[in-house]
Amino acid sequence: MEWQEEDEEEGSDGVLSYTQIQKKSDAEGSWQHDRSSPGPETSSKKKTKKIEVMKAEFQPEFTKLSDRMAKEVMRTTAQVTKELMQVREQLTEVRSELDLLQWHSRVGQDFHVTV
């Protein structure tokens, strides 16, 4: 990846070596004396380009992740909807049984009262 190659100038721990610091210092010093060499604008442009390259590389991964998450949400929603419908049916059955028991209870009480 292009952005990785530019960072490989640093050590594996991200710290510049003495030689790298010296080269960087020399380059910055020479820029101050020679206005024709690349300056801070070029460095900023490199960073901007690096960010754009990273965005372009990671955008497809984010899109895939977003698509997978959307599919998972749809699947889970469908499953929960199915389970809720089953629970609703069970509650309807229990309510019917309770209504029937109440009716039998009232009829039984009425029967005992009239007898």
Image: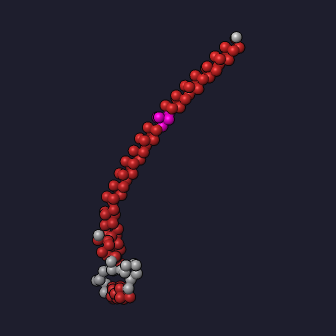
Nearest the eye: 72 or 20: 72
Residue 27, position in %: x, y?
Answer: 33, 86
Residue 25 showing in the rendered view: no
Vertical placement of residue 15 versus 87, above or below? below
Relative placement, left or right, of 78 versus 6 is right
Nearest the eye: 31 or 5: 5
Q: Is residue 87 magenta?
A: yes
* Residue visible at 58% across and 22% down in the picture: 100
Nearest the eye: 30 or 26: 26
Residue 5 found in image quarter: bottom left
Q: Main secondary structure of the magenta part?
A: helix
Q: Is residue 32 magenta?
A: no
Residue 62, position in %: x, y?
Answer: 36, 58
Quadrant (top left, top right, bottom left, bottom right) of the N terminus: bottom left
Q: Magenta residues?
A: 84-88
* Residue visible at 52% across and 28% down in the picture: 93
